[in-house]
Image (cartoon, rainbow, N blue to C red):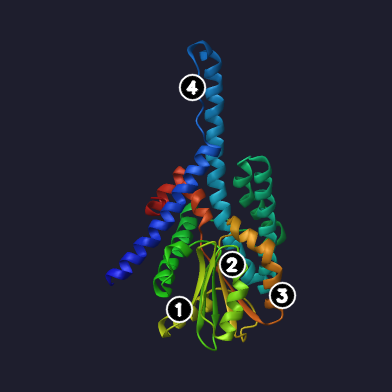
Amino acid sequence: MSNSANINRMLLVAVIVLAVALAAVLIYFLALKPPIKTSTSQSQSSSSSSSSSQSSASSQLSLITTAFERGVENWLNLVCIYNKYGANATLSAVNSIYTISYSYIYDYEETGNTTYLLVYPIAQYQYLASHYTNCAVSESDQDLVNTVIGALNNINTIAYTLNIPGNLLGTPLFIVYDRANNITYVLAGASPYVFNAINDALRGNITVFTYQGQELGYGFRANSTQVSLIGELISSGLRIGNPNANITVIEFLDPECPYCAIFQVEYGRSLEAMINSGYVYYVIQYFPTHVLGYGCSSPTIAQMLGPYCG
């Protein structure tokens, strides 16, 4: 492998590790802050308080581990729903779980109670298990970790082949591809620029999308190697809509990603209308960004994730 390939892969791992480290710090200081030491005169009550705090911290750690487990299983549930219930049911399930997470994130913003950030993967899982009873997934922690690592390795290959810079490696990540002219756009974040990219690709335009000086996406004409990779991503993903549409939108998502939920709530109906009309072929792939933060904040899971937790 060339030096540039190695550098690109190292950059991706560094970006992921940085994101995980920030998530771990956030969860630690908001949910697992150690008790403040008290004076000697308060030692008797301090002992009881310390015991209670330790119990609370243990409970929070258990909840974080569960959030990781249910979070990855939510993705496996979606794959199962696609295989057993069909494409339309999958799209409906995605809409529903993001509506659930959006509600919990809103509650967190209103109250500052970080428990809301830990329990919504569980609420999503309960919804999917109750509505799609043939897809109640229960996997070992090692299998769940393997799923995450496999998906991240896949992202490594995609980032290298499509030359995606580190600042755009987050969820939701969109690849907009026009098979008639091979014009391709890469976009990140919960923004409406996906629709601009669709229009520009159809018109044969190549441009860069920026907002307040920050690059949110860019276009290019894919070469033969890149076209081949995009074809593999389409064939291996959860495919919804008209396969003969000129435009394919590949979304890399994490069921636990709050920005994915925001995109779905804000712009999901517009994208779904394009899918239902046959204008856009929609493909879902897995990019476990947010769930990685849960895993790396759990001592047991972090050991299994190894270098992905820094």
Q: Quadrant of residue 80?
A: bottom right
Discs 3, 2 touching: Cβ within 8 Å: no
Would you call the spot at circle 3 few (<14 residues within 10 Å), some (14-19), or many (20 or more)? Answer: few
Q: 106 above or below 148?
A: above
- The x and y percentages for residue 112 are 63, 40
Instruction: Tell me the amino acid under the disc marked 3.
Output: Ala
Alpha-carbon distance for marks 3 and 1? Answer: 27 Å
Alpha-carbon distance for marks 4 and 2? Answer: 48 Å
Dot 3: element? helix
Instruction: Tell me the amino acid under the disc marked 2.
Output: Val
- The x and y percentages for residue 77 are 61, 62
Alpha-carbon distance for marks 3 and 2? Answer: 22 Å
Residue at screen point 50% across, 61% down:
170
Disc number for residue 79: 2
Q: Nearer the viewer, residue 136 or 236?
A: 236
Q: Earlier in the sequence, mark 3 or mark 1?
A: 1
Residue at screen point 27% across, 69% down:
3
Would you call the spot at circle 2 few (<14 residues within 10 Å), some (14-19), or many (20 or more)? Answer: many
Residue position marked by numbered label 4 in the rendering:
37
Residue position marked by numbered label 1 in the rendering:
229
Residue position marked by numbered label 3 in the rendering:
273
Instruction: Tell me the amino acid under the disc marked 4.
Output: Lys
Dot 2: element? helix
Alpha-carbon distance for marks 4 and 3? Answer: 57 Å
In this rendering, does residue 86 appear at all? no
Q: Earlier in the sequence, mark 1 or mark 4?
A: 4
Dot 1: element? helix
